[in-house]
Image (cartoon, rainbow, N blue to C red):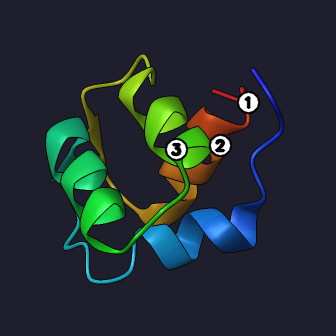
């Protein structure tokens, strides 16, 4: 998977209330106009829920 820019990722997740499900995160990214690369990366995350934004960033960068 390509390296996701954490700043772009957090912009894509603007407005998400945590804890959040993967579906909620993907929907928010799509609503916020995230790139196809970011939306695809979020859809492929192994976890189904996230407690905080940094958890999403870690998972998307492969650190989880």
- 2 and 1 marks in contact (CB < 8 Å): yes
Q: Residue furthest right?
A: 3
Dot 3 or dot 1: first in sequence order is 3
Dot 2 or dot 1: first in sequence order is 2
Q: Which quarter of the figure has residue 3?
A: top right
Query: 49 or 7, which lies in front?
Result: 7
Mark 3 residue crowding within 10 angstroms, few (<14) / some (14–19) / many (20+): few
Residue for badge 3: 36
Helix, strand or loop under label 2? helix
Mark nearest the camera among 3 and 2 is 3
- 3 and 1 marks in contact (CB < 8 Å): no
Helix, strand or loop under label 1? loop
Residue drawn at (46%, 69%), measured in percent from left and top?
A: 12
In this picture, residue 40 sits left or right of residue 29: right
Quadrant for the N terminus in the image: top right
Residue drawn at (72%, 62%), measured in percent from left and top?
A: 6
Query: 13 or 54, which lies in front?
Result: 13
Mark nearest the camera among 3 and 1 is 3
Residue for badge 2: 58
In this picture, residue 36 sits left or right of residue 25: right
Compute the Cα span from label 3 to label 2.
Answer: 19 Å
Residue drawn at (42%, 16%), measured in percent from left and top?
A: 46
Compute the Cα span from label 2 to label 1.
Answer: 5 Å
Mark 2 residue crowding within 10 angstroms, few (<14) / some (14–19) / many (20+): few
Residue for badge 1: 63
Dot 3 or dot 2: first in sequence order is 3
Helix, strand or loop under label 3? helix
Q: Position of residue 41 (x, y in %)?
A: 54, 32
Q: Position of residue 7 (x, y in %)?
A: 71, 73
Query: 10 or 51, which lies in front?
Result: 10
Q: In the figure, 10 relative to 55: above or below?
A: below
Mark 1 residue crowding within 10 angstroms, few (<14) / some (14–19) / many (20+): few
């Amino acid at each position: 998977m390509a390296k996701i820019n954490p700043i772009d990722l957090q912009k894509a997740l603007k407005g998400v209330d945590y804890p959040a499900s993967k579906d909620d995160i993907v929907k928010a990214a799509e609503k916020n106009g995230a790139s196809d690369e970011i939306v695809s990366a979020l859809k492929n995350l192994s976890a189904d829920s996230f407690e905080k934004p940094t958890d999403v960033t870690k998972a998307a960068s492969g650190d989880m």
